[in-house]
Amino acid sequence: MSRAQIIFIRLALLALVLAAWEFLPRREIVNPLLLPPLGDVLSLLGNLLQRAQVHEAIGVTAAEVVVAFLIAVPLGAALGVLIAESEYLGAVFKPVLFYVFSIPKSIFLPLFILVFGISFAQKVAYAAFTTTFVVLISAATAVESVKQDYLLVARSYGATRAQILLRVYVPSMMPLLLEALRISMIFNFTGVMIAEMYASRTGIGHLIAGWGENFQMPELFAGVIVLATVAILFNEAVRFFEARCSTWRT
Amino acid sequence: MQHVANLTRTGIDPAALAAPRGESAIEVDNLSHVYAGAQGAVPALENISMSVRAGRFVVIVGPSGCGKTSLLMMLAGLRAQSRGTILCQGSPIPNPDPRRIGVIFQEASLYPWLSALDNIEFPLSLRGALRAERRQRAEAMLRLVGLEGFGARFPHELSGGMKQRVSIARGLVQDPPVLLMDEPFAALDEQTRMTMGHELLRIWSMTSKTVVFITHSLTEAVYLADEVLVMSARPGRIIDRIEVPLPRPRTYEMMATDVFGQLRDRIWQQIRKTP
Amino acid sequence: MTLPAPAKVRRAMFIALLLLWELVPRTGLIPELFLPALSSTLAVLYQDWRIYAEALAVTLYEVAVAMVIACGGGIVAGAVVGGVARLRELLLPVFSSLYAVPIVILYPVFTAWFGVGPESKIAFAGIYAFFPVMLSTAAGIRTIDPQFILAARSMGATLTQQITRVIIPASLPAVFAGLRLGGALAIIGVVVSEMLTAAAGIGYLVTLNRTILDSPRVFAALLMILILSVAYYMLARAIESRMVVWQSAERSPKAVRGEVGVPISAAA
C-alpha cells in the first residue's frame, strides 16, 4: 500500500470515530449525559481555553512536567550509564530493575505527600521518581547498544576517550537517546497526571478529577481531548526527529 | 501401498525404491516465470529445460538473484510457474508432495520446541503414522546421518552442522526418491561445509536418491555433482551443462587435480560472462 | 580485592533495607509519621488481617477480570494486527502513538460511567494493560521465522496443521510474555484506580488511611501491594521459563523494551 493510501485510510478511520462521537449521542442512541456529542465538547473546549483558571492550571502542570523532567533525565542517565559501564554494578542491579518495574510506583505517592505535603514539590518529586527509572533503563540500553565493533575500531585507530565518546557513542546512541526522551516524557506526563489527580489543589489533572466527580462530562472530555492532543503532538514531534536520525539503523 | 510398506521397514532398502537407471526423475520443459514487481513485470526465469535421470546428483550454480531458489521452489511444488511444465517421475507437482520430493532449506528451520527426533518425525506425524513406526523410522534416519544418541537434544543445543544433518534426516524420513537442497551448507563455516559435503555423498550413495542441489560454491559444485548446470543472471537461463567425469566415491585429494581445476574454471568463465 | 557475588550483594541489600526500615523510625531519624517501623506495620497487618484479606480479595478479583480483557483482547488483537501485513502497516503506528496518551486521564470518565465499584477499575485496568500487551504480542509475532511455514508446507502440512503444529507453538513465547506483562499492568492499573476513587480494595485502604494519617495502616497496605506484584512477577517468570524452555532467557533491559522499542512497562 502506498503512503497516500495508508494516510487516507487512517484519516478515514479517524473521521469515522469522530462522526460516531457526534451522532450517537445526538441521536440519543448513546446517553448524551454520559457521552456528550463531540460538537458540544469542542465548543466548550474553545470556551475553556479562554478561562483564567484553566490557563493557570495548564501553567502549573506544564511547570511540573518540565521540572520533573529536568531532574529525572540527568539523574536517570547518570545512573543508567553507571550500570551499563560497570559490569559489576550491572550484575547486581539489573535483576532488581525487573522487579522494580512490576511494582506500581503510585503506591509511593502517600509517602511523597507525607514528606512534602500537598504541593508543587510533592508532584514534581513523585514524577521525577517514576521517570528516573525509565530514563535509567533506556540510558543503560542505549549505552549497551553501541556495538563493541565500533569501539574496537575507534580504539585501534588511537582515538582518545573524549573522541570515542563524542564521535562514536553519541552518534550511535542518538536514535535511542531520542526515543528514550520520548518514552520518558510519556511516563513523566503520566506521573504528573496521577499525582495531580490523586492529591492536588492545582493543575489540569486536578481539574479533570474535579469535573469527573461533579459529572461535568463536557468539561471532562474537553480536558481529555486537550491533554491527549498535546501528548500525541509531542510524541510525534520527537518521533519525527528520531526517524531523521536513524536512517542508518537496520 | 509401497509407501506404507516403507514406513514399517526398519532400514532403508535402496533397491526397492530407486527407479531403474535411465528413467527420468525430473523433467522440466520450457519453464519461464515472470513475477509482478514494484515497477511492472519482472522476468525471473527464461526457457529453462532440464532432464534429470534417476539416481543422479545434479548441481545448479549461478550468481545471486538468478532465480535458482525460485526454480527449486517450483520443483518442490511450493510455487507455481508462469509457463512451462515440470514433471516428477512422470507426473506434475501442483502441491508439495513429501513422499515424492524432500526439500532441505538453507536455514535448517528445525522447530525449536521439538527435539531432534521429534523434528525428524514431524512429517510422519502430519500424515498420522503410528507412534512406534514413526520412532523407528526417525531413529533409522538419525543413524544414517551420523547423529545416533543425539535424538533427545533440542535445536538450540546443536551446532550448525548437526542441525543441517537433522534437517537432512527430516527430508529423508519419508523416503522420497527426489531430494531438493537449497544451499544447505551456506550458513556453515568452510571446514564444516567440506565435512558435510562428504557426509552428504556418503548418505546419497547409500540411498540412491535423485538430488538437485543449489550452491554458490564452485568447489562444492564440482566436488558433489555428476552434472553441473550453470545459470545466468536474471532472467535465469541455463547457459551450460557440464559433466563431471570424476570417479566416485569422491575424495578430498581430487580437489587438487587438474581436472578439478579446469572444471571449476569453466564454470567460473561462464558465470563471469553473464552481465 | 575481589568483589562479592552479585546475588549476595542483593541479598545483603535487601536485609539491610529491612533493618533500616525497622531501626531508622525507632531512632527518630525519620518520624514514625513518615515511615512507621516495620514491626508496627506488621503488627497492624496481623491485627487487622481480616480487613486486609477482604480488600485483597476485591483487588484480586478486579485484577483477574482486567487480565482477561487485556490479555485475551490484547493477545488476539496483537496477533492479528502483527501478523497481517496490511493491518500492521496501517494500525500499529496508530496504536503506538495512542500509547503516548496517559490513560489515567480517562479514569474519571470510567468512574462517571460505571460508578466507584469494581467495574470502573476493571474497565480502566483492562484498557491500561491492553495496549502494551497488544504491542508486545504484535512485536513477538513478527519474530516467528517465516521459513517455518515454508518447511511445513514442503512437508505436506495442511493449513490447519500449519496453524496448530507450527504457528501456535511458535507463538507461545510471545503469548506468555503477553500474559506476564498483562498481569503486571493489570495489577498496577487496579491499584492506581483504587487509590484514586474507590470504596474497596487495597488501593482504597491506602488512601483511606492516608487521609486519617494512620501511617502503619498505610504501609501495611503498601506492603501487601509490594508482595502481590513481586509474587506475580516471580510466578509468571517461573511458569514462563518452564513452558518455554528453548527461549534464550537473556534478561537484558532490552527485554523490558520489546522489539518495537516501546518500553512495555509500568507508567504508574
Image (cartoon, rainbow, N blue to C red):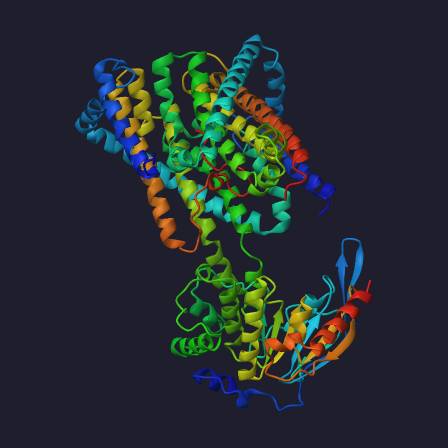
Depth check, front residue: B275 or A226: B275
Q: Position of residue B43 (x, y in %)?
A: 79, 64
Q: Nearer the viewer, residue A195 or C65?
A: A195
In which quarter of the view is residue A107 placed?
Answer: top left
Question: Residue at image x 57%, y 31%?
Answer: A177
Q: Look at the picture and state if A241 lies above or below B131.
A: above
Residue B45, percent from left and from top? 77, 68
Percent from the top left, x then y, of residue C108?
A: 46, 25
Describe residue B52's horizontal placement relative to residue C187 as left or right: right
Q: Is residue C266 left or right of residue C60?
A: right
Q: Is residue A35 visible?
A: no
Q: Residue at x 69, y 80 (%)?
A: B87
Q: Quadrant of residue C190?
A: top left
In the rendered image, the quadrant that contains the N terminus of chain C is top left
- Tell which of B222 and A32 is nearer to you: B222
Seen in the picture, residue B246 relative to C42 is either above or below; the reply is below
Q: Could you tell me which residue is drawn at 64 percent across and 39 percent down?
A: A13
Left or right position of C217 against A232 = left
